[in-house]
Amino acid sequence: MTRPPDATWARNAPSQIALNSIFAALDAALIVIILQDREATTGWHLLSLALLVVSFFLFAVSAEKGVVALDEHDVKKYVYYLLPYNLGVVCGGVAIEILTYVRFGHKVLGWLAPRLGTCSYWVSLLVWLIAAVVFMWTWIHDAFWLLFCGQAAFDTWLEELEDKRSPMRDHGLLMKLFYFMRRVFRG
């Protein structure tokens, strides 16, 4: 008996599993780097370390259970384990933002202080927070959507993943901006 061709989700699952593994390896490398720092058990370093450990385990669970979903041909299980992936990216991203702020925040403050005075600390912290949200918006949005989208939208997406329905175009804001800029500058 011939097996039907794999659906979109099953063809994409190995890449998702590899991506989880790459991110888990990045988290592990950053954990080792932090642990070699003498300040690793204080303040922001400790928070960053904790977030990286959580992120590492989220990626490990997502990768391992993604393999199980692929083996069992279970699209719902595959989609469920996309949530730990998205949360892992957010946790890892926040950890990297914290590490970056700890390492380079004083330079930003040194540049802002003569210009903004006493509020420079809060401005630099706000800039770092906004940067974190902007850089991780895709994963924040995806995690939120997986948790809170309507049942009809979720079922439609599952049908798209299983090739029972043609996918709807979903061009994000940055992609729309990119093509708008191309039209403006290239005609």
Image (spheres, rainbow, N blue to C red):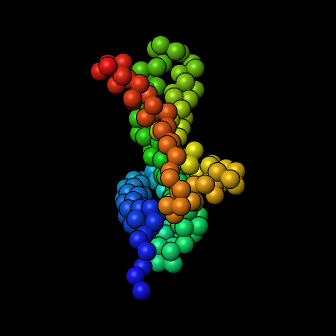
View extreme (front): residue? 1
**Residue 81 in view (yes/no):** no
Asked if residue 119 lies left or right of residue 184, the reply is: right
Q: Residue at x 64, y 51 (%)?
A: 153
Front residue (pair 145, 180) = 180
Residue 125 higher or lower than 169, as above or below: above
If the image is split into quadrants, where does the N terminus sit? bottom left
Front residue (pair 31, 73) = 73
Residue 149 higher or lower than 163, as above or below: above
Task: Say which quarter of the image contains residue 33.
Answer: bottom left
Q: Residue at x 49, y 61 (%)?
A: 163
View extreme (top): residue? 115
**Percent from the top left, x then y, of residue 127?**
51, 28
Residue 139 higher or lower than 57, as above or below: above
**Percent from the top left, x then y, of residue 90?**
53, 49
Q: Residue at x 70, y 50 (%)?
A: 150
Residue 120 higher or lower than 71, as above or below: above
Front residue (pair 19, 145) = 145
